[in-house]
Image (cartoon, coloured by chain):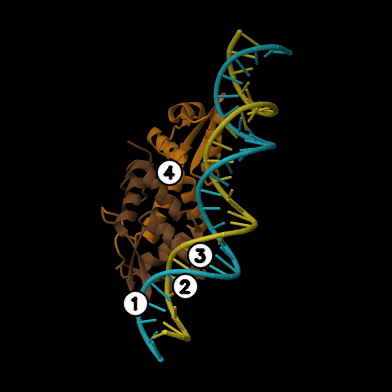
Chain colours: A orange, B brown, C cyan, D yellow
Amino acid sequence: MKIDTAVSLLGALAQGSRLALFRLLVQQGPDGMAAGEIAERLGIAPNALSFHLKELSRVGLLKSRQEGRFIYYAPDFKVMGGLVAYLTENCCAGSKAADPCCPPR
Amino acid sequence: MKIDTAVSLLGALAQGSRLALFRLLVQQGPDGMAAGEIAERLGIAPNALSFHLKELSRVGLLKSRQEGRFIYYAPDFKVMGGLVAYLTENCCAGSKAADPCCPPR
DNA sequence: TTCATTTTTCAATGATTATTGAAATGATAA
DNA sequence: TTATCATTTCAATAATCATTGAAAAATGAA
């Protein structure tokens, strides 16, 4: 992963509503959750939520599918996995311990 | 870790110069590197670097110590480890696989 | 078609953030 | 002391981002 990609992904998650949103969708699993229900659960206005969904989708952290009038959003676990792997390798000296970060060598 | 803490840490790393800076210091290890050398290596103006060092220190990702005229900065590996653990638990459904993110259950 | 529902888009505002150049601080050496 | 080096602070500008309210698409139901 290029550093610019990591910066984009980190930036997308570095916001309270978006991190809460992503956590919720991770809990929900690959089937996803409709935008309206997400907005209700998080107490965010639908248009504000749409802004954040777009932001997370733009960087690739969310996938969506339409079903009738509803649009379901779900995490792309591969992308998130790539970010965690990047952080572990580049910002944790590649540690594989239970405590994931330690000095190099 | 509280979600607000995670947001702060993510925000501190969600910037090109700062992520490059943190990576460099992780490579360098716990002895750290003087501000001047960091600026030279990254090609950042000293005052701009100071701004970013302050930002990373503010959220706890860096520790510093003075030695003569030099100030050495080093990562706080525990804090970074806490962030990676938070992301793994909350945003990767707690997966412990080689590919760190997968759907829950 | 007409209506209600779901979601997105748009424009405006305010808030936060990064960058630049200049000046100031703090520490050591002459 | 004075001078030099390393780093930080300050002020100004520009850029980016989040929030709000209103309107517009898109889908399906009556």
Kindly indicate the quadrant of the structure image that contains residue D23.
top right
Q: Nearer the viewer, residue A65 or A10?
A: A10
Residue D19's place in the image compared with A61, above or below, is above
* Mark 3 or mark 1, earlier in chain: 3
Residue B19's place in the image compared with A41, above or below, is below
Task: Please name the amino acid that badge 1 sits on.
Answer: Gly
Residue at mark 4 shares a chain with residue at mark 3 = no
Residue at mark 1 shares a chain with residue at mark 4 = no
Separation (CA) of disc 3 from disc 1: 22 Å
Disc 2 designates what residue?
B41
Element marked by disc 4: helix
Front: mark 4 or 3: 3
Residue at mark 2 shares a chain with residue at mark 3 = yes
Separation (CA) of disc 2 from disc 1: 21 Å
Q: Quadrant of the C terminus of chain A?
A: bottom left
Residue B31 in view: yes
Element marked by disc 3: helix
Task: Please name the amino acid that badge 2 sits on.
Answer: Arg
Disc 3 designates what residue?
B48
Separation (CA) of disc 1 from disc 4: 48 Å
Task: Please name the amino acid that badge 3 sits on.
Answer: Ala
Element marked by disc 1: loop
